[in-house]
Image (spheres, rainbow, N blue to C red):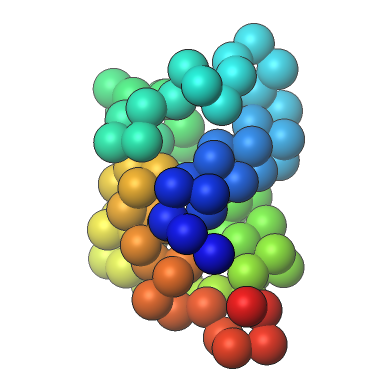
Amino acid sequence: MEKAELVQELKKLIIEKLKLEDITADEIGDDTQLFGEGLGLDSIDALELVVALEKTYGIRIPDEDVGKEAFRSVSALADYVIKNKPKQFN
């Protein structure tokens, strides 16, 4: 899967899993921060995303430091998924 395609897929997953009905995938910039100033997600949202990513892509986010880096933006998250996705999820 190409990174651009994965970025769009991740945006849709974020909207669906976090029930962000007032925003579209096109409104989320690839490099927009997911937490704080960007989308304004919180720790509960992070937990929901981790579960969704584990189920959808088979990736694990082992600790908070890895999570902070992976969840920096949708683009960073796509890079993390590409790098850590098990072969059976390709």
Quadrant in the picture for the N terminus: bottom right
| Image position of 45 with respect to 23: above or below | below
The answer to which quarter of the image holds residue 88 is: bottom right
Residue 7 place in picture, x, y as percent: 48, 46
Residue 38 place in picture, x, y as percent: 33, 24
| Image position of 30 with respect to 80: above or below | above
Residue at x 72% of width, y 68% of height: 55
Q: Is residue 45 left or right of residue 42?
A: right
Residue 72 place in picture, x, y as percent: 30, 46
Residue at x 54% of width, y 41% of height: 8
In the image shown, does 23 or 66 lie closer to the viewer?
A: 23
Residue 27 place in picture, x, y as percent: 48, 17
Residue at x 45% of width, y 25% of height: 28
Q: Is residue 62 visible?
A: no
Q: Residue furthest bottom?
A: 87
Q: Is residue 35 left or right of residue 58?
A: left
| Image position of 3 with respect to 54: above or below | above
Q: Is residue 27 left or right of residue 25?
A: left
Q: How many marks?
A: 0
Residue at x 43% of width, y 56% of height: 3
